[in-house]
Amino acid sequence: MLLVRGFTPRDLSRVYDIECKSFKDPYHVMVLLNLYELYPESFFVAEEDGVVVGYVISRRVDTSGHILAIATDPSHRRWGIGKVLMATVMEHFRKIGANDIWLEVRASNEVAIGFYKGLGFEEAGKALGYYSDGEEALIFKKKWGKWPTFSLSHTS
């Protein structure tokens, strides 16, 4: 059974492992810990049978929510875990009065772009040279509206 809960420092090793498996330029383990220290209320993990299988890190900026990172362990992708994590963080921001939510994604990451569009995010701009290799980021934004409901698509 999937459980989404707040991150704790004991999750750090597993979150870092997923981070390294998921991103071309992963956050350093100390950056992840620093993000938790700065934004503990909006750093969530998904746990399956006691094992962290995904996470989302976010923060509030003025009246908006900002997704800093979201990832699911490669062995658990396409189960709906990312959707559940996104629904959790979007509801968190809606409850605390944020007007919208935004994120950056590599322009070449077609899978992630499709994922965000499927959640109702729309392209709102570009950040040239955003990543360390010079690739641009697409900025996606979602204003509040009716939320879809999500369920997991696997059996344990």
Image (cartoon, rainbow, N blue to C red):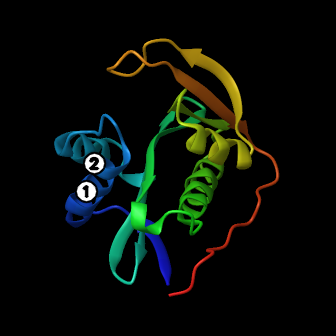
Identify the image quadrant of residue 82.
bottom right
For the point 74% across and 66% down, the residue is: 149
Residue 76's spot in the image, x, y percent? 46, 68
**Towards the viewer: 55 or 24:** 24
Q: Which mark is residue 149?
A: none
**Towards the viewer: 147 or 73:** 73
As drawn, the residue found furthest toward the right would be 146
Residue 114's spot in the image, x, y percent? 66, 43
**Towards the viewer: 13 or 108:** 108
Q: Which mark is residue 20?
A: 2
Identify the residue position indicated by label 1 in the image.
17
For the point 39% across and 67% down, the residue is: 53
Q: Is residue 45 visible?
A: no
Residue 89's spot in the image, x, y percent? 55, 53
Distance from the alpha carbon under mark 2 to that under mark 1: 5 Å
Residue 83's spot in the image, x, y percent? 61, 59
For the point 57% across and 60% down, the residue is: 88
For the point 54% across and 29% down, the residue is: 62
